[in-house]
Image (tube, rainbow, N blue to C red):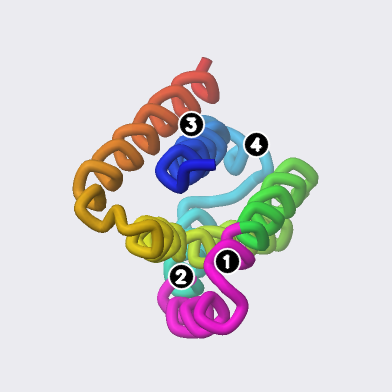
Amino acid sequence: MDPVRVYSIWSFLCGFIGCLGSATCAIFYLQLGLSLADFMLVYICFFAITVVFQLPAGVLADRCGRRFTMKISLGFQIVAFALRGTATGILGVLASQVAEAIAVILGCGGDGWLAAALTKRGRSNELESAFGRVGSRFWVGVVLGGGLGAW
């Protein structure tokens, strides 16, 4: 299958799934009894984990392959949604955000995978247009996922 098509589908799904619950997260967290300080703690943990795990995720992608880390990323995203859906307080929400942060970091190797796949096939001249198409599909997923989640 064409690597641009595969990565476009992946990007769309990441945007769609990632934003599907984002529109209602604040309402859900308020219903769980989280305060503004809890919100801040949850998102500070999310962003701290994404910073801390950048390097280890890159090493894992270099050793095991970017396709492998992207598959693991999808697994962590599923775990994150399951944890969020069953959370009953701050600890459950934190656990879901940790899983989601790891999913985001592991999924970041996709750009490198696409560049390597196109270069390997002698199509490196298509990189700019490929990243444009992939990016547009990601944002379509974001809008559709966020809109459906808000609906």
Residue at x-position 65% and y-position 57%: 71
Tell me where the magenta segment starts and ends, as one range.
Answer: 50-70
Residue type pointed to by label 1: Ile
Check residue 50 in the rendering and tell me which mark sits there, or answer none.
2
Label 3 or label 1, whichever comes before in sequence order: 3
Q: Secondary structure at mark 2?
A: helix
Front label number (4 vs 1): 1
Q: Vertically, is 38 above or below 148?
A: below
Task: Say which quarter of the image contains residue 55.
Answer: bottom left
The answer to whether marks 4 and 1 mark residues whose Cβ atoms lie closer than 8 Å is no
Label 4 or label 1, whichever comes before in sequence order: 4
Q: Vertically, is 88 above or below 44?
A: above
Residue at x-position 56% and y-position 37%: 17
Separation of marks 1 and 2 at Cα, in angstroms: 7 Å
Residue at x-position 44% and y-position 77%: 54
Q: Residues within 10 Å of mark 1 (few under 14, many from 20)?
A: many
Q: Is residue 55 magenta?
A: yes
The answer to whether marks 1 and 2 mark residues whose Cβ atoms lie closer than 8 Å is no
The residue that mark 4 highlights is 31
Q: Position of residue 84 (x, y in %)?
A: 69, 47
The residue that mark 1 highlights is 102
Residue 15 as seen in the image, left or right of residue 98: left
